[in-house]
């Protein structure tokens, strides 16, 4: 029995993970499930899988969680410290699928505990990649990428030495606005931005896919997970999302991982690794798909890619600033407070206004994150006056 915990259990990745666990009776035992504030959803998930504990980040949701779990034997807790404690509660395998930098502390705690961490929460790696990778090495934790591209790269590498790698080719769907002009994008609403053509995901990552900041964050994520050098990581637009990424070796042999665009495939890979489990996902029918298309990314229409690459090569605090500014701008866009094209403009403005020394601890990263959020708030206030 593998003992598993899921951080962000009520989200898109969390629910997919629970779905797979529910299909493998007797193979997984659930230690902890967490959510932000959806006490009812979390309690229902905890009861369904027989979790030992359930934790909400927001203390205001605690009474509802406690009442929903009364008499079940499942313990209820709330608050940031309780999340960190849950990450130390003895799971062998932890799904890190909280969205945003809010996942940083629990993800770090799970890495420090030294088990296997399946990482979906890319924002924590973008903001604190060096510290996270060092922590994993020191504790002996295994970090398994869940992001479909990084999971594909991990599978294509199959343990090969990184100095055999000539290029990593990170594929991108191009998002819902791939063929839209700048003028059209200026008018796009949150509902249009979250309607991804291939993947069903949470709101924040869906907007990131529309701006292509998602690919920018994934570039930084790849540079930490597979340190071949930034100049060896390329982005290739592939609208069908069938090839999830590729690795080209120095002998010019290129390996690709293919599959239907269903997150349960990379999640299943991480859940069972190094074994495999069956999934209910659609098998790939290439005859029906007929053709696969590719094009170079357009950094004029999608400046987020350029901003992320610049932040990655600057290193230090820059990726944490980029990520924090993006989180604030995406939240404002989803609340209809700013336009779609403002997102990348705000990120660029914050990167120009605020720089900080290289963070040496998680507290440093969180201080940079907080300051960058304040600067982003300031930038947005000036836009509206
Ligand atoms: P989501 O919005 O559907 O779910 C987010 C989860 O995090 C929820 O359980 C929510 O309760 C929890 N959460 C939100 N804010 C929190 C906070 N402040 N403190 C504690 N918990 C909080 O998001 P998602 O689409 O499942 O994405 C989760 C992560 O996985 C993101 O980092 C995303 O980039 C990454 N990812 C998602 C997909 C996908 O297909 N959805 C694919 C690749 C990577
Ligand atoms: Mg991805």
Image (cartoon, rainbow, N blue to C red):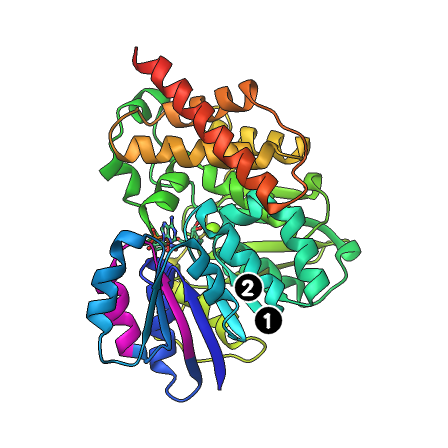
Q: Residues within 10 Å of mark 1 (few under 14, many from 20)?
A: many
On the question of residue 301 being in view, the answer is: no
- The residue tagged 1 is 115
**Numbered range of the magenta stretch:** 30-48
Q: Quadrant of residue 192?
A: top left
| Residue placed under numbered mark 2 in the picture | 110
* 135 shown above or below 140: above
Q: Is residue 208 visible?
A: yes
Provide the secondary structure element on which disc 2 rests: helix
Q: Residue furthest top?
A: 385
Farthest residue toward the bottom? 26
Q: Say which label, 2 or 1, has the lower sequence index.
A: 2
Residue 384: percent from left, percent from top:
30, 14
Q: Residues within 10 Å of mark 2 (few under 14, many from 20)?
A: many
Q: Are marks 2 and 1 in contact (CB under 8 Å)?
A: yes
What label does residue 367 carry, if any?
Answer: none
Q: Is residue 108 magenta?
A: no
């Amino acid at each position: 029995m593998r003992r598993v915990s899921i951080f962000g259990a009520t989200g898109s990745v969390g629910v997919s993970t629970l779905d797979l666990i529910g299909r493998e009776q007797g193979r997984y035992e659930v230690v902890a499930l967490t959510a932000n504030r959806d006490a009812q959803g979390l309690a229902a998930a905890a009861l369904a899988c027989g979790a030992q504990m359930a934790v909400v980040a927001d203390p205001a949701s605690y009474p509802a969680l406690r009442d929903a779990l009364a008499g079940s034997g499942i313990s209820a807790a709330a608050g940031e410290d309780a999340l960190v404690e849950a990450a130390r509660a003895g799971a062998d395998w932890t799904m890190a699928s909280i969205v945003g930098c809010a996942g940083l502390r629990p993800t770090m705690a799970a890495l420090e505990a030294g088990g296997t961490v399946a990482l979906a929460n890319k924002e924590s790696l973008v903001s604190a990649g060096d510290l996270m990778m060092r922590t994993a090495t020191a504790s002996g934790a295994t970090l398994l990428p869940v992001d479909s591209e990084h999971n594909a790269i991990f599978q294509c590498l199959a343990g090969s030495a990184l100095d055999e790698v000539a290029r990593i080719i990170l594929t991108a769907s191009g998002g819902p606005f791939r063929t839209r002009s700048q003028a059209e994008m200026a008018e796009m609403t949150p509902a249009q931005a979250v309607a991804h053509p291939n993947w069903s995901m949470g709101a924040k990552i869906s907007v990131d896919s529309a701006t292509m900041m998602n690919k920018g964050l994934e570039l930084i994520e790849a540079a930490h997970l597979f340190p071949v050098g930034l100049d060896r990581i390329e982005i290739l637009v592939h609208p069908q999302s069938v090839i999830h990424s590729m690795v080209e070796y120095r002998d010019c042999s290129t390996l690709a991982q293919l599959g239907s665009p269903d997150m349960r495939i990379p999640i299943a890979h991480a859940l069972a690794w190094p074994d495999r489990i069956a999934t209910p996902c659609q098998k790939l029918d290439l005859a029906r798909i007929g053709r696969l298309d590719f094009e170079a990314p357009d950094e004029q229409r999608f400046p987020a890619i350029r901003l992320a690459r610049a932040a990655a090569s600057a290193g230090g605090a820059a990726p944490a600033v980029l990520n924090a500014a993006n989180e604030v701008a995406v939240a404002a866009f989803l609340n209809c407070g700013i336009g779609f094209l403002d997102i990348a403009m705000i990120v660029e403005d914050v990167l120009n206004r605020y720089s900080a020394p290289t963070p040496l601890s998680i507290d440093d990263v969180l201080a940079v994150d907080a300051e960058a959020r304040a600067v982003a708030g300031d930038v947005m206030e000036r836009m509206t006056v």
